[in-house]
Amino acid sequence: MKDAIDLCFIGNGSHAGVIKNTLCDLNIKHNIVVFNRELELSKQPEVLNCAAIFIVSPNNTHAYYLRELNSVFNGYIYCEKPPVNQISEISILDEVNSSKLFFGFNYRYSDIGLFIADMSRKYGLGKMINMSIHVSYPFAIKEKYSHSWKSNVSNSPYGIIENLGIHYIDLSVTLLGRIKNIFISKRNIGQTGAVVDTATICCEHDNDATTQIFVSYISLVKDEMYFTFENGDVSYDGSVFTCFYPTACFGDSGLAIRPPAVCSLEVGEGVLYDNSMRNCLKEFMSVVMKKGSFDPCLFHNAKISVLAMFGLTYV
């Protein structure tokens, strides 16, 4: 394709397909260079000459490819979350060129942050003091799960925490800053495979705000978020964002009552994910095509989020 950019995908699963389709929707002219996983990267010049490489292979391979590419590739890398899924692999994050490395934490670019920022400006919500997340769907009871790498402890030792929870950990870091204390309760309720299918993650941030995250592959479908501010709240029930304002709202008896819903925005679960993915890829490709550098804060926050996934804090 004339005037098109060369891209390569390491990994060819369903998520790679979603990214490819999104790139087409963004009208980004590109050629796909095929990666041969049976051949060393150093022996694939057509891959190494690409403008960008997408690592969308199973989680346990990310660190290996990051290390390999770091020694032979000078282009841009989009690595799906998490960057690593073993504590012993964390050192790779100190070796890579962070200015050309982008991680697929797509909630950084979602309608969540945009709606919260808009409501904060409009109504003066003040400081966010708590973030509460409950996201679940019964993936672990499906036959597909038992054959998935996500249920294999060798490929995904942290189970749902590294596959789903990590997105919300990163969202909490994006909105509330560095985590200074973390507690994680891990359970394998369904007993399909040996990995965690249900987790509760509690974080305390440097600004003393708190986060509670519940994620499960064994309980019924639920996608709810609640953000508590000093002077109002924002909720998401899986289809609608709603802002409640002000906190100081009292009835005739003088007792506190529920503030009115002053603004709402309909964003269905599928739309929220699609918009997030679109904005994430748009940001990545914008830097690639301008031959620029990524904001170092993005990489810094990724390290905080990955360490939190292991139950560790960033010093």
Image (cartoon, rainbow, N blue to C red):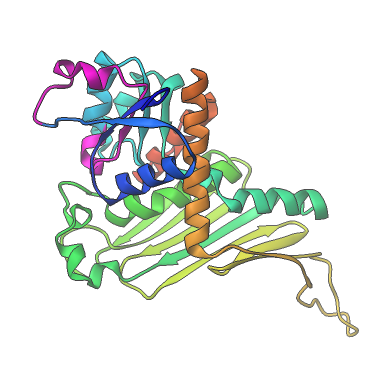
Left or right relative to 49: residue 27: right
Residue 218 vs residue 2, the one in the foreground: 2
Which residue is at a point 16% across and 54% down the rendered structure image? 152
Visible in this render: residue 291? yes
Residue at (73, 50) in percent of width and height: 118
Residue 311 in view of the camera: no
- Residue at the image point whose x is 60% and y is 44% from the top: 176
Residue at 29%, 16% (x, y): give it.
Answer: 49
Q: Residue furthest right?
A: 252
| Residue 172 painted magenta | no
- Of residues 48 and 24, the one nearer the viewer is 24
Outermost residue toward the front? Answer: 2
Q: Which residues are magenta?
A: 38-62
Number of numbered discs overlaid on the protein picture: 0
Q: Residue 94, position in %: x, y?
A: 36, 21
Q: Quadrant of residue 29?
A: top left
Image position, residue 193 (x, y; %)? 15, 62
Q: Nearer the viewer, residue 15 or 97?
A: 15
Lateral position of residue 244 relative to residue 295, left or right: right
Q: Position of residue 106 (x, y in %)?
A: 47, 45
Residue 83 in percent (x, y) is at 33, 36
In the image, is 198 to the left or to the right of 99? Answer: left
- Please determine whether, in this image, residue 278 is positioned above or below residue 133: above
In this picture, residue 31 sits left or right of residue 176: left
Where does the N terminus fall, quadrant-wise?
A: top left
Q: Is residue 39 magenta?
A: yes
